[in-house]
Amino acid sequence: MRRKITRILVIIAAFLVVLFAALFIRALWVLERSYAHVPSPSITADLSPAGVNRGEMLFQTLCMECHGGRDGRATGKHLTEVPAFLGNFYSANLAHAEYGVHQRSDAELARTLRTGVLPGGRFSFIMSMFGSLGDADIAALLGYVRSKPPALAPGGELQPQSEASLVGELLVTVAGAGVDQAASRRVVPVPARAPTVEYGRYMARAMDCVGCHTPGFGSTAEKMLAPDAFAGGVDLVDPTGTTIWSRNITMDAGTGVGRWSLADFERAVTRGVRPDGYLVRKPMPLFSRLDHVDIEAIHRFLQTLPPVHRPNTPGGHPLKKAEPHDGPETLFVSVGCAACHGDQAPYRDRLRGAGGKSEAAIAAWILDPQSIKPGSLMPSFNRTLDRAQAEGLARYVLELVRREGSGP
């Protein structure tokens, strides 16, 4: 009997070894081979003012979230929000004078956006997530790139090459990721821009809401059809390096956003503030450039989905409510400023922009940056702090700038 059990265990172990080897070989075949032969879509830059404006919204909303460097340009960075067990990932310097987007043809850039195939022929799993962008939106992005905007002013160094871990490679393989070679020949329409379910469904895919708020490693199309679509639970990493899980955004009244009004939903998405006054924490992007039509369409689409009752998993840099007696140093940490602007945090350098400004101007910026600079990626604190607290934080920020400017 013991020999029989031992034989069964050996057979199972051998099967697992063979399965692991097969998955590993497939991962190498998918990620390391050249796809230079994959055709490019027949999409060219839309240089019309409307096209460039749409492209700017898409670029600032989608591209700068990953490619935005410390200098405010698309010079790339270390993608610390990707869990370390998946590998070490960097976004490319799109503004590089020799290898940036200005040196690439419309065809090369369109192929990357539609299929994930980089100009050099390698496959990028992350870039393959943008295959849902319609032809007109890809043309708009190309139009924005060709307009030579400040975000793409040539400069910066090449970023290191991303390296997936063994676990990351296997997960990509298990998820069935790969190059959809037929995608280049498909026409992907962009629905008419209106507060409709159809346009909202498109935007939920194009903005990758479904990717971040639906668990699993399936494709965008597969996630859109999943029974737990938009129910949250995807593990990510916030700017402090703390694990955080995406939230349930189905219309479940208990665990989702079913009790939120359209105004609540719009404030959370474009101003970064939840109805309870807490910040919407990164790596959730701040979609401050989306307007009311975009938001209402997404909200209407979410209302058509079955509510999923899935409690949200606590995580991320802990936040606290501002108390009347809290000093500015305490507020800087408790309400969430330190996560982005603290020592060694990714946006620490942005504090230098406060130098030379008045306390009143900085306080106004803290309370509602979008009213001063439409499209700002900083959340609004006007439901979190009162004017006196914002002015106290302004003084604290000026002191930090003065201290760091004076050196050690």
Image (cartoon, helix red, strand yellow):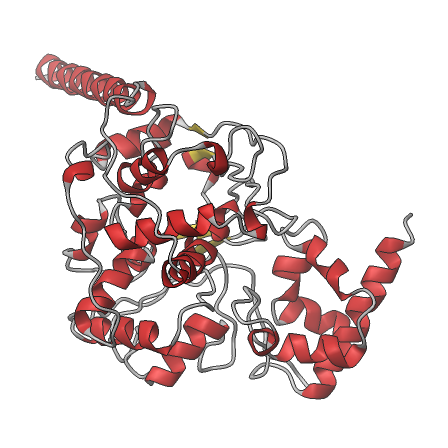
In the picture, measured across the screen, residue 150 lies left or right of residue 275, that is right
In this rendering, position of residue 116 left or right of residue 60: left
- Identify the residue at image location x=18%, y=31%: 181
Give the percent coordinates (x, y) of residue 15. Answer: 15, 18
Query: Is 78 located above or below residue 367 in the figure?
Result: above
Q: Quadrant of residue 193?
A: bottom left
Position of the N terminus by quadrant: top left
Give percent across and percent down for residue 255. Answer: 30, 73
Residue at 55 percent across and 40 percent down: it is: 95
Q: Which of the 4 image quadrants contains residue 321? A: bottom right
Residue 261 lies, with reference to residue 3, above or below; the image says below
State the image quarter where residue 347 is shown.
bottom right
Q: Nearer the viewer, residue 152 or 306?
A: 152
Is 303 on the left or on the right of 156, as rendered? left
Q: Using the image as rendered, state which of residue 194 and residue 340 is in the foreground.
A: 194
Residue 403 in view, yes or no: yes
Residue 25's x, y, as percent? Answer: 25, 17
